[in-house]
Image (cartoon, helix red, strand yellow):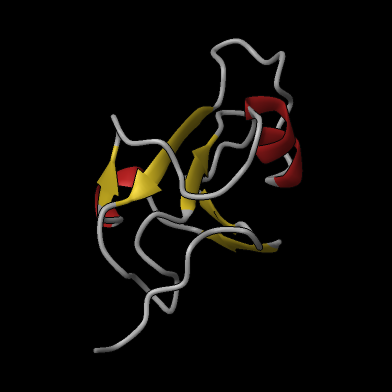
Amino acid sequence: MKIQMHRLSLQQVPVDLFADPDGTWSYESLVSAAGFDPEAVPPPLVAALSEPWCGHPEGAAVVVGSNESDPCVVIVELEDAPAIRAA
């Protein structure tokens, strides 16, 4: 699992809010890996990148929580996510 935090707002990331991230995961495992509390109110958001971005592949998990005053998104790449191969 590769995890990287970006101090950006969600609007600055190509994200599909209705897509599930690629790979095998649970909501709790992704949110915890991103450093957020799965029981937080409001709950952290989990979505997926809609295209490759900043070295992260399309389909990587995008996790956004509200426990910090600075905007940030956390990208989580799962080890069992399908690799994109060039033709």
Q: Position of residue 61 (x, y in %)?
A: 49, 48
Q: Position of residue 34 (x, y in %)?
A: 68, 46
Q: Position of residue 45 (x, y in %)?
A: 48, 28
Is the residue 82 above or below the residue 41 in the image? below
Is the residue 4 above or below the residue 24 in the image? below
Q: Is residue 30 left or right of residue 58?
A: right
Q: Quadrant of the N terminus?
A: bottom right
Is the residue 86 above or below the residue 77 in the image? below
**Which of 71/78 is in front?**
78
The quadrant in which residue 10 appears is top left
Q: How many marks?
A: 0
Q: Is residue 66 left or right of residue 58?
A: right
Instruction: Name which residue lies at 45% across and 44% down.
Output: 21
**Which of 47/11 is in front?**
47
Q: Residue at the front extreme?
A: 87
Instruction: Name which residue lies at 28% across and 29% down.
Output: 18
The quadrant in which residue 84 appears is bottom left
Instruction: Name which residue lies at 50% across and 37% down.
Output: 64
Q: Position of residue 24 (x, y in %)?
A: 62, 43
Q: Quadrant of the C terminus?
A: bottom left
**Which of 23/17 is in front?**
23
Instruction: Name which residue lies at 48% across and 63% down.
Output: 82
